[in-house]
Image: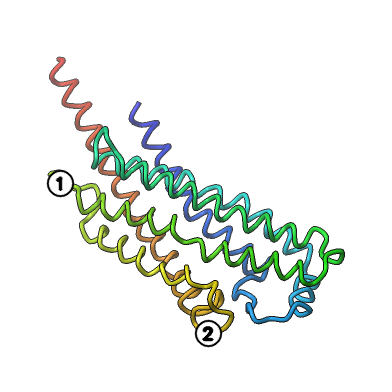
Amino acid sequence: MPDMNITAQRLCVWCGPIMIATWAAAFIFLCRFIPPPSPAKSRAQLVEQFSQHTGLIRLGLVISLFACALLVPFCAVIAAQIRRMEGVRSVLAETQLVSGGLLCVEFLLPFAIWQTALYRLHEWSPEIVQMLNDMSWLMFLGVISSACVQVAALGVAILLDKGAKPVFPRWAGYFNIWVSIIWIPAGIIPFFKTGPFAWNGVFAWWIPLCVYFSWFVVMIVLLLRAIGEDEHSQLDAKTTGECVSH
């Protein structure tokens, strides 16, 4: 049933912007993690920051946990479109999908660790709270390899698409590879507590954040267009088949 499949794909696409909007709202208005707290902040300052809005931060983390799970259906619809390019032996589609699933886990774990830090905030020593916060930010921003492989696999698939009518424009392949490269500097944040490569710095936070948002906008537009073209081709094939049968 092509219509059902097309509808499901569109629903999966819209999981992406819902995730981003929900996540941004939770991080800005509840967790107050944008901008991120400086890694050079003292233990006492960090505990004080968490103490001021403990309940709201917990709520923001719970909302973020649910929101980031929406990354999986978004990656699934990308994989579905890559399979249109690759055919049966779709290794790049599987690579993109598995990498997206890993990235979802890499988002879930830091949220769980932050929740642990806040669960007994005034029973833990400030050293433990700082350690848990460090673990969360280093994992949340520094474990970037899965995201890089995910978008690189998509980029390579687009560039290898030899179909008469490519699923995505060729420039989107170069765009995805560029995004993958731009994210790499975030992987070196364990070496810095201040400056542009610290987790609140321009190369580790602000540039990757803007690029991630831009990537979602570009891919949402391209995916909706690709799904629309796929729908038209299925309808044309169905119409042709009916004409032949009559």
Identify residue type, mark 2: Gly
Classify 10 Å Cα crowding around label 1: few (below 14), some (14-19), many (20 and above): few
| Res 208 quadrant in image | bottom left
In the rendered image, the quadrant that contains the C terminus is: top left
In the rendered image, the quadrant that contains the N terminus is: top left
Name the residue rendered at 32%, 60% in the picture.
176
Q: Going by the image, does 144 lie left or right of 92?
A: right
Name the residue rendered at 65%, 57% in the picture.
111
| Res 213 quadrant in image | bottom left
Q: Where is residue 114 drawn, in percent x and y?
A: 69, 61
Marks 1 and 2, how far apart at CA:
44 Å
For numbered disc 2, what is the local secondary structure? loop
Identify residue type, mark 1: Lys
For disc 2, the marked residue is 195
Name the residue rendered at 25%, 32% in the picture.
234
- Rendered position, 138 above or below 99: below
User: Which color scheme does this rendered protein use?
Assistant: rainbow
For numbered disc 1, what is the local secondary structure? loop
Figure label count:
2
Q: Where is residue 79 drawn, in percent x and y?
A: 36, 43
For disc 1, the marked residue is 162
Q: Where is residue 58 drawn, in percent x and y?
A: 74, 59
Q: Earlier in the sequence, mark 1 or mark 2?
A: 1
